[in-house]
Image (cartoon, helix red, strand yellow):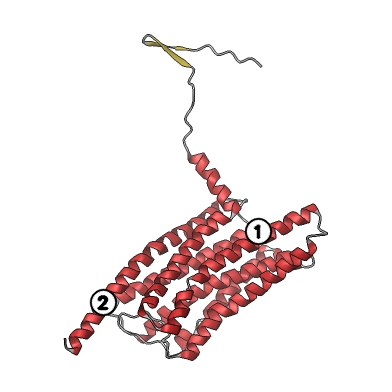
């Protein structure tokens, strides 16, 4: 086989691999986007029960998930069908929005941790920190920070268009890769861990002498901390193949890396509904209301061919 034929064969194999990966990823992305949209609608229509700070932040994470999933599908579409657009600038912007989607989800968990810190530690002295206004400001700041942190994707010339390859920072640009890992993963995760450890220690210290009401509040705080840590852990699991690929450069791991975030995002959204008691109860209540009720005993007796109404006596 000559060099040209070998190159064409490798290119066909790449495209075929991407098609399989894209199909698998698409299934999980559709589920994740559907659940995220469902959460947004459910919180919006269930007033006032779900109109809380916790569910506001949950909706922010759901919106970030939708943003991430859409950018990933656009990237897959360009890899498989968009080879007419070979502009480096377009490729950099696709990378920019893809990285922004990843960072937005992780930083949404950071502001959830900050919110828990406000409620658990600072609420007694600074009540305004637990207001909706403060949390709207947190959400706006989160998105501004995310779009600023990911700007090196378009401000540098590190990303170039390569046929049948995702628009990411190439491994040879190690400084940019290191910045990506630190800014998008380590930088938000470390404060989350520190905040939750601090809150947990403080709650355990004050629990002994706390009143029954305070103990119930602290139990809710610990339950919420556990839920957020579980969800964040599921999401971060999707980044393990990325780290393995950076260390090994094995193509199979790269393909797994393209699928694993979609799978973990889907699982994370399912667990969001199952772990949030309020949303779970609202869903159960709506299902119960929608279920048809079959009456038992109509009070009618058929004798011969004519129905007669049974005389029923109610003794009190």
Check the image and report above or below for 278 versus 128.
Answer: above
Residue closest to the eye, 269 or 263: 263
Residue ID at (48%, 40%): 290
Image position, residue 140 (x, y; %): 59, 72
Residue 127 appears in the figure: no
Check the image and report above or below for 179 versus 282.
Answer: below
Residue ID at (77%, 56%): 214
Residue ID at (62%, 70%): 111
**Residue 164 as seen in the image, left or right of residue 218:** left
Q: Label 1, label 2: how many angstroms apart (C-alpha)?
A: 48 Å
Which quarter of the figure has residue 17?
Answer: bottom left
Could you say whether the residue bearing mark 1 is in a helix, strand or loop? helix
Q: Looking at the image, do the residues carrying marks 1 and 2 touch, with CB atoms under 8 Å apart?
A: no
**Residue 270 as seen in the image, left or right of residue 200:** left
Q: Which residue is mark 2?
A: 13
Quadrant where the N terminus is found in the figure = bottom left
Could you say whether the residue bearing mark 2 is in a helix, strand or loop? helix
* Comes first in the chain, label 1 or label 2: 2
Image position, residue 43 (x, y; %): 56, 55
**Residue 144 as seen in the image, left or right of residue 27:** right
Which quarter of the figure has residue 149?
Answer: bottom right
Quadrant where the C terminus is found in the figure = top right
The 10 Å Cα crowd at callout 1, few under 14, some 14 to 19, many 20 or more, is some
**Residue 249 as seen in the image, left or right of residue 1:** right
Check the image and report above or below for 155 versus 82.
Answer: below
Check the image and report above or below for 124 versus 295.
Answer: below
Residue closest to the eye, 272 or 95: 272
Q: Which residue is mark 1?
A: 223
């Amino acid at each position: 086989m000559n060099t040209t034929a070998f190159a064409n064969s490798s290119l066909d194999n790449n495209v075929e691999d991407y098609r399989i990966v894209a199909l698998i990823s698409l299934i999980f992305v559709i589920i994740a986007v559907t659940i995220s949209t469902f959460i947004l609608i459910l919180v919006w229509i269930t007033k006032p029960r779900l109109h809380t700070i916790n569910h506001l932040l949950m909706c922010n994470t759901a919106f970030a998930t939708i943003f991430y999933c859409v950018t990933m599908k656009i990237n897959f579409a360009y890899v498989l069908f968009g080879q007419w657009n070979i502009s480096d600038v377009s490729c950099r912007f696709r990378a920019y929005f893809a990285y922004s989607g990843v960072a937005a989800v992780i930083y949404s968990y950071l502001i959830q941790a900050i919110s828990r810190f406000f409620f658990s530690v600072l609420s007694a002295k600074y009540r305004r920190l637990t207001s909706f206004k403060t949390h709207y400001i947190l959400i706006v700041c989160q998105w501004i920070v995310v779009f600023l942190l990911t700007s090196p994707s378009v401000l540098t010339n590190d990303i170039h268009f390569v046929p049948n390859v995702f628009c990411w920072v190439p491994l040879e640009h190690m400084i940019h890769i290191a910045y990506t890992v630190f800014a998008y993963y380590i930088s938000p995760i470390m404060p989350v861990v520190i905040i939750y450890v601090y809150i947990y220690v403080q709650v355990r210290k004050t629990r002994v002498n706390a009143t029954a009401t305070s103990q119930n509040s602290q139990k809710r705080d610990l339950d919420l901390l556990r839920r957020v840590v579980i969800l964040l852990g599921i999401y971060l699991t999707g980044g393990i193949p990325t780290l393995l690929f950076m260390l090994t450069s094995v193509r199979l791991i790269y393909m797994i890396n393209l699928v694993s975030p979609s799978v973990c995002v889907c699982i994370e959204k399912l667990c969001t509904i199952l772990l949030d008691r309020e949303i779970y109860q609202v869903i159960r209540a709506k299902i119960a209301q929608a279920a048809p009720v079959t009456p038992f005993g109509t009070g009618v007796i058929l004798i011969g061919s004519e129905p007669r109404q049974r005389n029923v006596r109610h003794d009190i």
